[in-house]
Every structure is written in C-alpha cells, then in structure tokens.
Image (cartoon, rainbow, N blue to C red):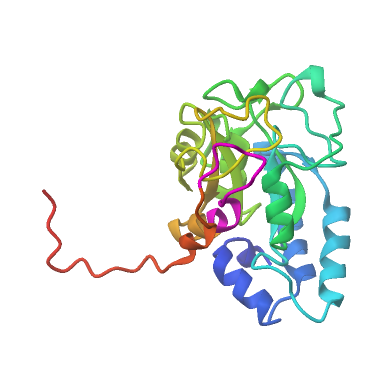
Amino acid sequence: MQELCFTPARRLAALLRARKLSATEVVKAFIAQIERVNPKVNAIVTFLPEQALKTAKELDRKKSRPGPFAGLPIAYKDNVQTKGIRTTFGSPIYKDNVPKEDHLIVERLSAAGAITLGKTNLPEFAAGSQTFNAVFGATRNPYDVSKTCGGSSGGAAAAVACGMLPFADGGDLAASLRNPANYCNVVALRPTPGRVPAWPAPNAWNTLSVLGPIARTVEDAAFLLSAMAGPDARSPVSIDGPGSVFLKSLKKNFKKTKIT
C-alpha cells in the first residue's frame, strides 16, 4: 500500500478509471501513510480519514468515475476555504473558524473527483518563508526533521514529498510555492497571475499572490494545474484560457534545438 503513495498521480488516476484500483484502496493507502509519517513532520494539520473513506466508498458504488481525479485524495492549504471544514489561516484568531462556502479551487477539484483528506500547515496568514504557527506548531523537513521545510506552502510540500498526498495546492506571493518545493525536493510552479482564479478574495484585483500546484513530478504538477486553471466570472483578473492546455504531452524532441 505504501507503494501506491509514491505512484505518480496520473498513473493512479488511470488505474482508478480502469477500475484496476478502487478509490477505497487508494484512500486507505494514503490514510495509512499519514498516520505513519505525519507525527514526525506535522504537515497535515486537519485530518479527515472517516469523511474521505465515506466519499471513496460512495464513489466506488457508482457505475462511472466522474472527473479525471476521481478517487485521488487531496488536502488543501489551511488558508483555502473549505465548506464545513476548519480553516484556521494558521492563526489563533481563526482556530475555530469553519467556512460556509468552498474556495473556487475546492469547487473545481471536487468536481474533478478529488477527495478531501484534510488541510496542510502554513505560517500565520501565510506570511513567511518557514512553516510554523501558534495553532499547530512547526512543519519539519522530510529529509531532516531538524531543518525547515520552507514556506509558506510548507505543509503541502512536505506532505507530497512524504507520499502523504499525490499532489497539493499552494499559494505564492514571494516564492511561497517555489521555496518549499526546493526545500522538500518536489516540483512547484508559480503560474501567471489570473491563470488560477481566486474566489472568494478580499481583493479581487490582486495579481501579486497566485495559486498553483505542488507535485513530485512535472507531469503531475501539470495534471493538477489542468483542473485548477481556467476562467471564472467571479474573478475579474482570470485568464480566458482553458486549463486543459496543461494536459498536452510534455515530450519533445530537442534535436537541432539551439539555445542562444
């Protein structure tokens, strides 16, 4: 089961679509990995195994698998609103905050079939290049728990590096995706502002902070971005282009390519 946790997300998705794996098997594997590893790194701060298993079993009873991510678990950064699930922003002010609506990317990934397994750690209000706060404490580097995992998407990067998630979302204002990805030896991308819309947002016209993917491979980062990206009328800065463009093959023949 641990091997499943390090299988590329696109490969897992293909096995799930072909019903060579059940959603219940996949979710159970990731739950077991979180229970085994998370006490050492503290990357997942709200953990929802029973809710995720219930959703997986319901999915397995359906005749078809709706959405490209059907059966894949995800945990959202703890400043991304999740309806009915605690969202603390890493701050004691919001330690008991339970939103009444989902963030746009939660809507999209849920519609794509992703199963919510919990929330990932961040510095208070995502302000910082390390990941610690007064609510949940510090997230550790998966390769050396005496070192930092970076931030602010440190919980997401550490969770993906440890095989506790196949991929994860993060935000980036000043390297908050890129910094922890480098520290944790995973892949992240700061997309063009507007490529992944943000709603609800305190400032709908903000283009400084962006949302993007974290994964263990470039291909899986593109896979996650394909569902996160695309226009939305609620976000006035969103780019009018479908996320499906990121599903194109990344293979290219570089013969005769010139670098100047």
Report the number of numbered marks: 0
What kind of secondary structure does the magenta stretch mostly adopt? loop
Whether residue 103 is situated above or below residue 139 in the rendered picture: below
Give the residue at x 15% y 62%.
257
Can residue 33 be seen in this snapshot? no
Give the residue at x 16% y 69%.
255
Whether residue 106 is situated above or below residue 149 in the rendered picture: below
Give the residue at x 49% y 65%.
247
Whether residue 17 is situated above or below residue 49 in the rendered picture: below
- Left or right of 117, for residue 172: left
The residue lying toward the viewer, choosing from 182 and 67, is: 67
- Left or right of 12, for residue 99: right
Q: Position of residue 30 (x, y in %)?
A: 71, 58
Q: Is residue 232 magenta?
A: yes
Q: Quadrant of residue 85?
A: top right
Can residue 156 be seen in this snapshot? yes
Q: Position of residue 127 (x, y in %)?
A: 59, 21
- Look at the image and give the residue range highlighted in magenta: 224-239
- Left or right of 92, for residue 15: left
Q: Position of residue 226 (x, y in %)?
A: 54, 58
| Quadrant housing the N terminus | bottom right
Q: Position of residue 129 (x, y in %)?
A: 52, 24
Q: Quadrant of residue 73?
A: bottom right
